[in-house]
Image: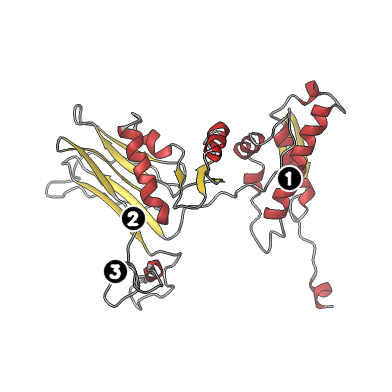
Amino acid sequence: MDDLRQYKTIRRQPLSITYRGYDVILPSPPCAGGLHILQILRLLEGYDVAELGFGTADGIHLLAECFKIAFADRSAHVGDPASGDVPVAWLLSEPYAAARRATIRMDKAAPQAAGVKPSNESGDTTHVTVADRDGNIAALTQTINHTFGSKVMVPGTGVLLNNCMALFDPHPGHPNSVGPGKRTVSSMSPAIVLKDGQPIMALGTPGGVRIFPSVAQAIVNVIDHGMSLQQAVEAPRVWTQGQALEVEQAIPNPVRHELANRGHEVQEVTTVAGGMNGVAFDPQSGPMHGAACWRADGSPAALGGGPARSGIRFQSTANRR
């Protein structure tokens, strides 16, 4: 009876997309039907449905594959928005639709799992790379491990204590086992790369145990594959520590199939590690180039103009979460 007495009507904004020049408007969650009709239409935009024809095997097969995707996502991601986040914008986005179209084979029915919801930049680890005109470089990764660390604040300071003790091996007798006075291992990898004694690049990233393989890939991308630093930090990544081989969505399907044929348990993920950033140096001409990737909201910035008045040295600070 209390539930009935407390019930009230909630006015919600409808959802809409443009499909082949038509504005299609439907109710929003918790009415899942509207969301998934729009999701299906977004998927179908990538096909010439008229050319496939009504009632044909191709037309029905395509509809069936889109329905399976919608139902998988409904089960995994959609509920009452008052009790949890419903990723409407992501489910209706063109990049997500394109990624799901890549899983549809027109010659064969395939099982369709729910999509992997995008992960946000962590609230626990931050990396910043700074360089100045005098050749000073700072590559800094800072972490409190889990979000809000131990969730204990030192009174009067505003400083949260980390919970990095969780990174110790809980089993005795190992190199990283818990012990008095010991410092735990860390995956943080702020890096500076030199050639002939001159800096070529400095970089780093958040991302827990995925940090150092990601930084290694970026270094290889520049040195071995001839990428710019911006290309290197944005390039698709992979990661494993012996179980599944995580691959980002941009890794092509033929490459995934070949990896699977070689015995890897391939698992698609939205991101490997976090938003990498860095500074690249051109020892010949002198300019510096900032780089930051799409996996977070960091961005390169250049500040100049010299001291505001004599006796004042320029100082730059940056922080990105």
Near-viewer residue (170 or 311): 170
Q: Which residue is mark 1?
A: 70
- Residue 200 visible in image: yes
Q: Gap in Å between the C-alphas at discs 2 and 3?
A: 14 Å
Q: Earlier in the sequence, mark 1 or mark 2?
A: 1
Q: Earlier in the sequence, mark 1 or mark 3?
A: 1
Q: Gap in Å between the C-alphas at discs 1 and 2?
A: 39 Å
Q: Residue at left 29%, top 53%?
A: 140
Q: Which residue is mark 3?
A: 183
Q: Which residue is mark 2?
A: 188
- How many numbered marks appear? 3
Q: Residue at left 36%, top 40%?
A: 218
The image quadrant of residue 2 is bottom right
Q: Residues within 10 Å of mark 2 (few under 14, many from 20)?
A: many
Amino acid type at mark 1: Ala
Q: Gap in Å between the C-alphas at discs 1 and 3?
A: 48 Å
